[in-house]
Image: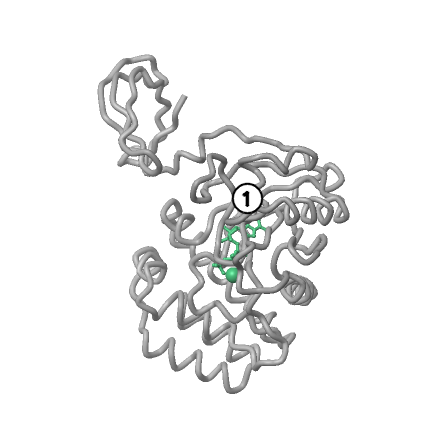
């Protein structure tokens, strides 16, 4: 059974009678005869822009089996060696992780199992910690960070302001945190076009940035944040990836995020403008600059207003 969003926003339940795969990894085209919920048959072609990985069943692999391929490749991407595999398995056990679950919308090149996310520093997968599903960021062997301990420290500080997934544990190569079940902002925006909902989510993103500014923690990568905000099923946004964060620099979270979302040339800013309408960019830049000078709640609210209302 497949659910497709029609041009008019009615949900139609489709039974695939005949299907073919258009491309190996990304788009799946389905052609054939379908039965709608009323039982009547109709013919059409559907191009699903959805990642095929979404439909792959989850694979739960106990730590004892993670040394085998293809899992060892994810554990020590991109160059597994026997010593590294064994030392990482020891680390995982010490953290209390009993298994990893391979499911998600991202792929690791050359690995036939999906993951939650992948970046230049880490690969993020679901893990089991004392029976609870959490997320674990696995440091890539070729990462330009020697360990994930600084990121863990910064994440803990963000948590103190009630921002970001809760830190659950950390070691040299693993960062264990609260699992966020949602979509990264650009994907979420593709499926959520209701103005008030988008305004609400973006306001909460800016409020979280304000709280980070107030505790003196600069995220460091919010001016190019397409992958750094996840929106969960309850419409709560979560800021992730604190590896470049600092509590020594002057924080610029609100202005970085505000400019990224509302004044930049980014695809996300284009998506946002499409939903909430074109904003006065000069007024936004001015309000953000003004906030940056005073850092008061009033200046923050004025900036939010310029961005969103
Ligand atoms: N707690 C979480 N729950 C669910 N998914 C997560 C979580 N943390 C991260 N992810 C997913 O994993 C992706 C990669 O994580 P992250 O940005 O920390 O990796 P990175 O290697 O530092 O990336 P980059 O190269 O962009 O800096 C995120 O964009 C997000 O999709
Ligand atoms: Mg990163």
Q: Is 14 placed left or right of 156 in the picture?
A: left
Mark 1 is surrounded, within 10 Å at the Cα level, by few (under 14), some (14 to 19) or many (20 or more) other residues, namely: many
In the displayed structure, 41 sits above or below 248; it is above
Q: Residue furthest bottom?
A: 293
SS assignment at label 1: helix
Q: Measured along the vertical axis of the image, is residue 96 above or below residue 158?
A: above
How is the structure coloured here? one colour
Where residue 253 sits: x, y (%)? 52, 72
Asked whether 307 or 244 is in front, the reply is: 244
Image quadrant where one finds the N terminus: top left
- Asked if the residue at label 1 sits under 8 Å from ligand 1, the reply is no
Task: Give left or right: position of 278 versus 191.
Answer: left
102 versus 269 height, above or below: above
Question: Looking at the picture, does residue 1 appear above or below residue 104?
Answer: above
Quadrant hosting residue 54: top left
Instruction: Please give the residue where the numbered disc 1 appears in the rendered image.
Output: 74
Q: How many marks?
A: 1
Q: Residue at x 70, y 56 (%)?
A: 170
Classify residue 186 as left or right of residue 34.
right
Q: Is residue 309 visible?
A: no
- List x then y, in percent, for residue 179: 61, 46
Depth order, front residue of 157/203: 157
| x, y percent for residue 290 | 46, 84
Quick one: quadrant of the C terminus? bottom left
Spot occupied by residue 135 in the image (x, y as percentages of width and height): 62, 47
Quarter where residue 281 is shown: bottom left
Q: For this rendering, which residue is in front, 121 or 77?
A: 77
Looking at the image, residue 266 sits to the left or right of residue 102; the answer is: left
């Amino acid at each position: 059974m497949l659910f497709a969003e029609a041009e008019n926003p009615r949900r139609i339940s489709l039974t695939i009678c005949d299907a073919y795969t258009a491309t190996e990894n990304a788009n799946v085209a389905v052609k054939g005869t379908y039965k709608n919920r009323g039982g009547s048959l109709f013919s059409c072609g559907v191009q699903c822009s959805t990642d095929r990985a979404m439909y792959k069943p989850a694979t739960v692999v106990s730590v004892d089996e993670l040394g085998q391929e293809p899992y060892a490749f994810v554990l020590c991407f991109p160059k597994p060696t026997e010593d590294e595999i064994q030392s990482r398995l020891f680390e995982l056990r010490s953290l209390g992780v009993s298994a990893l679950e391979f499911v998600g919308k991202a792929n690791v090149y050359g690995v036939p199992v999906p993951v939650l996310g992948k970046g230049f520093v880490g690969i993020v997968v679901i893990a089991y910690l004392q029976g609870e599903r959490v997320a674990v960021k696995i440091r890539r062997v070729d990462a330009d960070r020697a360990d994930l301990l600084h990121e863990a420290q910064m994440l803990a500080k963000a948590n103190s302001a009630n921002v970001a997934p809760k830190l659950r544990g950390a070691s040299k190569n693993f960062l264990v945190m609260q699992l966020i079940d949602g979509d990264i902002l650009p994907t979420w925006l593709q499926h959520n076009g209701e103005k008030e909902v988008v305004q609400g989510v973006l306001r909460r993103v800016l409020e979280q940035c304000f709280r980070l500014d107030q505790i003196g923690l600069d995220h460091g990568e919010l001016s190019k944040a397409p992958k750094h905000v996840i929106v969960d099923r309850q419409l709560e946004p979560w800021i992730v990836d604190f590896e470049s964060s600092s509590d020594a620099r002057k924080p610029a979270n609100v202005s970085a995020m505000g400019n990224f979302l509302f004044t930049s040339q980014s695809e996300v800013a284009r998506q946002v403008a499409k939903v909430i309408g074109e904003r006065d960019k000069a007024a936004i830049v001015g309000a953000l600059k003004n906030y940056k000078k005073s850092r008061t709640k009033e200046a923050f609210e004025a900036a939010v207003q310029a961005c969103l209302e």
